[in-house]
Image (cartoon, rainbow, N blue to C red):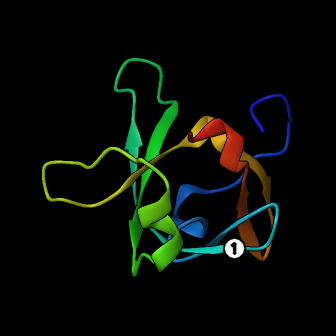
Amino acid sequence: MADTKEKILARNLLDKVVVSKSGKKFGEVGDLVFDTKTGEIIDFTLINPTKYVKDVSLEKDTNGDFLVPFHSVIAIGDFLVISEEDIL
């Protein structure tokens, strides 16, 4: 995802449904975690996490929300598609 030149506004990512490339729904994008020096998105939180999230050992933020590494995103469209292999 980081190799593309297309720009997407961060606000357009919020509330997008997060699915794996195999089609499992993980929840929706809740918030974005940025590197303050580079502006790069590091992680995003999940809201309304599904049962599949419990099968993956994701870190949690200080609020107890699941953190998904942004480098796991392989496509952004109607959904945010993640690679499960990159979050294991």
User: Residue furthest toward the front?
Assistant: 55
Q: Looking at the image, which residue is at 47% across and 20% down? A: 38
* In this rendering, position of residue 30 left or right of residue 14: left
User: Residue furthest toward the left?
Assistant: 62
Residue 30 in sight: no
User: What percent of the width, then of the height, locates residue 78?
Assistant: 78, 77
**Residue 71, quarter of picture:** top right
Q: Looking at the image, which residue is at 22% across and 48% down? A: 61
Of 24 and 73, nearer the camera is 24
User: Residue furthest toward the top?
Assistant: 37
Query: In what element is the residue under mark 1?
Result: loop
User: What percent of the width, then of the height, locates residue 70?
Assistant: 57, 41
* In this rendering, position of residue 32 left or right of residue 9: left
Of the residues shown, which amino acid type is indicated by label 1? Lys
Of 49 and 31, nearer the camera is 49
Residue of label 1: 24
User: What percent of the width, then of the height, locates residue 44?
Assistant: 45, 52
* Crowd band around label 1 with a 10 angstrom C-alpha radius: few (<14), some (14–19), many (20+): some
